[in-house]
C-alpha cells in the first residue's frame, strides 16, 4: 500500500529547490524519507538513512532491485531468486552503517546545516544536527512546529518546507 502511495506521489517545489541548490553548492542531502522523491526531483548526492521503499532487498544476497508497479508479494531477487523485502529500515532495526557514516562525515564538515521538515526527535539522525553545530556550522531549521533543535538553531523558521525554501530563495 505504501509503495503504491509513494509511486503516485510527486515531488513538491521544496524537493526541486533542493535539487537546484545542489547544482550550485556542495550539498549532501541526508533524508529520513523512504519515498525516493528527492532523487526523482533531481538530487544526486542523497543519503537515505531509512532506505527507499521503491526498491527491494534480497534477504539472502542483499541485492537491490527497483520494484516494478504490480510486483508480486513477496518480491523475488532478480539475482538469486530468493525472497526479498522492502529496502527500508523497520522499527527497531539499525540504520545502514555505511550510509550513516557518510552522513556523519557530511554533517561534521558542513558550514551550513539545513534541518528541514523533521520533528528532530528521531535518533540518531537528530544528533547529526547537534554534531554540525558543535563543529561550528550555522544551523538553520525549517519546520512548522518548534522542536528540540529550535533553541540550538542559529535561525529557526516556523514554516513548512515549501514556504521555507521560497523564503530562502527570496520568493516569499
Ligand atoms: Zn538474492
Image: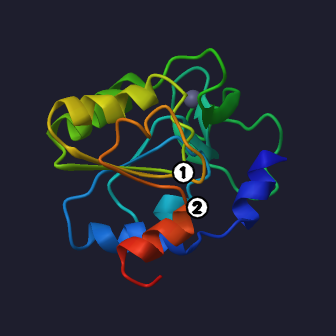
Which numbered circle lies on residue 146? none
Residue 172 or residue 104, whichever sits in front: 172
Nearer-N-terminus badge (2/1): 1
For residue 39, side relative to residue 140 (left or right): right
Q: Confirm whether residue 100 shows in the render.
A: yes
Q: Could you tell me which residue is drawn at 59 percent across and 45 percent down? A: 34
**As displayed, is residue 38 above or below residue 84?**
below
Q: Are marks 2 and 1 in contact (CB under 8 Å)?
A: yes
From this viewpoint, which residue is outermost toward the front? 151
Q: Measure how far apart labels 2 and 1 are at the Cα level.
A: 7 Å
Q: Residue 75's x, y, as percent?
A: 74, 38
For residue 133, side relative to residue 7 (left or right): left
Q: Could you tell me which residue is drawn at 26 percent across and 29 percent down? A: 131
Neighbor class of circle 1 (other Cα within 10 Å; few <14, some 14-19, many 20+) is some
Check disc 1 and report its element: helix, strand or loop: loop
Residue 14 or residue 142, whichever sits in front: 142
For residue 138, side relative to residue 39 (left or right): left
Q: Residue 98's x, y, as percent?
A: 33, 28
Q: Confirm whether residue 42 shows in the render.
A: no
Q: Residue 101's x, y, as percent?
A: 29, 27
Is ligand 1 less than 8 Å from the beta carbon at label 1? no
Query: How many marks do you count on the picture?
Result: 2
Which numbered circle lies on residue 117? 1
Check disc 2 and report its element: helix, strand or loop: loop
Ligand 1 quadrant? top right
Q: Which residue is mark 2?
A: 160
Neighbor class of circle 2 (other Cα within 10 Å; few <14, some 14-19, many 20+) is some
Q: Could you tell me which residue is drawn at 71 percent across and 27 percent down? A: 83
Q: Could you tell me which residue is drawn at 47 percent across and 61 percent down? A: 39
Amino acid at each position: 500500500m505504501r509503495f503504491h502511495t509513494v509511486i503516485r506521489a510527486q515531488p513538491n517545489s521544496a524537493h526541486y529547490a533542493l535539487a537546484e541548490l545542489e547544482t550550485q553548492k556542495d550539498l549532501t542531502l541526508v533524508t529520513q524519507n523512504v519515498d525516493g522523491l528527492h532523487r526523482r526531483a533531481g538530487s544526486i548526492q542523497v543519503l537515505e538513512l531509512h532506505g527507499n521503499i521503491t526498491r527491494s532487498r534480497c534477504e539472502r544476497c542483499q541485492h537491490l532491485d527497483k520494484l516494478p508497479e504490480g510486483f508480486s508479494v513477496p518480491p523475488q531477487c532478480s539475482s538469486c531468486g530468493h525472497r526479498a523485502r522492502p529496502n527500508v529500515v523497520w522499527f527497531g532495526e539499525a540504520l545502514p552503517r555505511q550510509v550513516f557514516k557518510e552522513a556523519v562525515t557530511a554533517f561534521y564538515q558542513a558550514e551550513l546545516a539545513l534541518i528541514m521538515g523533521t520533528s528532530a526527535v528521531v535518533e540518531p539522525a537528530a544528533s547529526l544536527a547537534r554534531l554540525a553545530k558543535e563543529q561550528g556550522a550555522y544551523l538553520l531549521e525549517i519546520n512548522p512546529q518548534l522542536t528540540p533543535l529550535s533553541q540550538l538553531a542559529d535561525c529557526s523558521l516556523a514554516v513548512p518546507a515549501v514556504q521555507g525554501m521560497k523564503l530562502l530563495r527570496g520568493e516569499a
